[in-house]
């Protein structure tokens, strides 16, 4: 299943310290997913940081075991469109001596 038609897409980068090696068939699946997301989102410039973020999302999903290129593509697009999720730290309420 390895397809050398996607040589410009590199999956050798580490995602947040993860060290994982993908076999050639999995790399082909990841490349198909990235290419599908790029087309769906109409991203033309291969150096666009958005493509990098999509690729990282697809790699993270693959690290969790997902191998369906359509599902990888769709989930990556969903995360991309949702934008960054900002979680604000909230101060814990003061506890009384009885609760400690």
Image: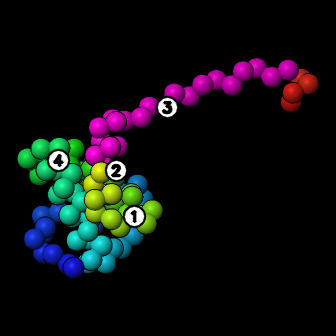
Residue matched to label 2: 75
Residue 84 badge: none
The crowding category of the residue bearing disc 2, from other C-alpha atoms within 10 Å (few below 14, some 14 to 19, many at least 20), is: some
- Disc 3/disc 1 C-alpha distance (Å): 26 Å
The answer to whether residue 42 is visible is yes
Q: Earlier in the sequence, mark 2 or mark 1?
A: 1
- Disc 1/disc 4 C-alpha distance (Å): 20 Å
Residue matched to label 3: 87
Mostly what secondary structure, the magenta segment?
Answer: loop
Q: Earlier in the sequence, mark 3 or mark 1?
A: 1
Task: Work out which quarter of the rendered image holds the C terminus and state it.
Answer: top right
Badge 1 element? loop
Q: Are marks 3 and 4 in contact (CB under 8 Å)?
A: no
Residue 66 badge: 1
Q: Earlier in the sequence, mark 1 or mark 4?
A: 4
Residue matched to label 4: 40
Q: Are marks 2 and 1 in contact (CB under 8 Å)?
A: yes
Badge 2 element? helix
Residue 92 among magenta residues: yes
């Amino acid at each position: 299943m390895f397809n050398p038609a996607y040589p410009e897409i590199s999956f050798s980068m580490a995602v947040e310290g993860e060290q994982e090696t993908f076999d050639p068939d999995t790399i082909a699946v990841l490349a198909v997913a990235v290419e599908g997301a790029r087309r769906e989102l109409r991203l033309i410039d291969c150096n666009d940081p958005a493509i990098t973020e999509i690729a990282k999302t697809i790699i993270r999903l693959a690290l969790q075991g997902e191998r369906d290129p359509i599902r990888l593509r769709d989930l990556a697009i969903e995360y991309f469109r949702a934008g960054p999720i900002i979680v604000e730290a909230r101060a814990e309420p003061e506890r009384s001596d009885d609760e400690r």
